[in-house]
Image (cartoon, helix red, strand yellow):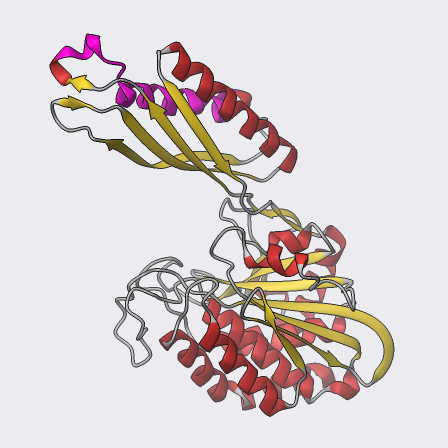
Amino acid sequence: MDPIKSAIKNKAESIFNELVEIRRHFHKYPELSYQEEQTSKRIQEILTRLGIPYTTGWCKHGVVGILKGNLPGERVIALRADMDALPILETNETDYISTHDGIMHACGHDVHMTSLIGTLMILNELKDHFSGIIKFIFQPAEEKLPGGASVLIEEGVLKDPVPQLILGQHVQPGLPVGQIGLSAGAFMASCDEIYITIKGKGGHAAQAHLCVDPVYISSQLINALQSVISREKPASIPSVLSFGSIHSVGGTTNVIPDEVKLEGTFRSLNEEWRMRAIKRIREIGHGLVSSLNGSCEIDIQRGYPCLINNDQKTAELIEQARQFLGDENVVHLEPRLTSEDFAYYTHQIPAVFYRLGVGEVPGVHTSKFDIEESALRTSSALMAYLAIQMA
């Protein structure tokens, strides 16, 4: 076996039990976006104990630092893990269930942080085997707009030194432990939030002819906006437009309200089409509502861009991951219309984001999400290997 690969796997095995405890601690004490104070302190305690230098205060609670190799070279590679939890009430029955009512690490960020800590533990003992700088980023607020990644970029996280590559990983329920999955190019979707207020003229439901019914107008608008997907979208570009909330302000069984509020999301895997679609949503919205004698306010909050895996670096990562895990454990995953603020990094520097197999477990963003903890061996060891092997 390659001596580097052997050393990494041995070290990953030796720290496995400690990583399990670290991950369970994070899981037990989750914190919401922009509130990750205690999480940050825990990370800092571990890094201080390891003697790894870092800085704090990034996007309030982020932790960023560098680990220098002892071999000659000037390459810089960045590794990122997100820190925040979700406003979900956990219903698991474990010793490490969330102690913060209504808050849960339901998206695996506890795993991501622990994996990066494990990676740093491994690399810290292998400085004689790599060159240049490993820049590590513990990033707050992935789950909430505008996204911690965008804030960190504005604060200069990709400067002094500038990475030539950034890597990130994300848990993947349903993918076996020991495997990773990814694809090159557009890998995850942009995500824009749509808020529409339709105003009409309320009144008695039995006298609809005297009203301008915003409920009826809302139903027509939801149907009409689907033409953006069914008739205007290029067939080759995956996109979705969905409305998850319809709320009348004052309406009931026999009362037509004055106002209806709609909330939805638009997602796409192409940035140029994204801009055109947003323009058309506004045009169709104002035009249709006006034609039915109502008025509307359309607020589209721009969310995360499309996540783009660099073609060349993805091919390199796949080759290196196969060397470490075996060919059968590196699988192709189709692009998906979920979103991730890691996307911001991918529009700044070459980047690769891959999915980590955590076994047959409930899906992310559910109250039952958990992982097969043996995945922590793969997550830490593979990222350490990639950090050494890739440039």
Question: Percent position (x, y) of residue 43?
Answer: 53, 80
Question: Percent position (x, y) of residue 131?
Answer: 81, 78
Q: Residue 142, relative to residue 38: is it above or below? A: above
The answer to whether residue 243 is left or right of residue 114 is left
Q: Residue at x 36, y 66 (%)?
A: 104
Q: Quadrant of the C terminus?
A: bottom right
The answer to whether residue 192 is left or right of residue 55 is left
Closer-to-camera residue (211/283): 211
The answer to whether residue 208 is left or right of residue 266 is left
The image quadrant of residue 306 is: top right
Q: Residue 177, relative to residue 68: is it above or below? A: above
- Verify whether residue 155 appears in magenta: no
Question: Percent position (x, y) of residue 345?
Answer: 66, 56
Q: Quadrant of the N terminus?
A: bottom right
The residue range painted magenta reads 207-231
Residue 155 in sight here: yes
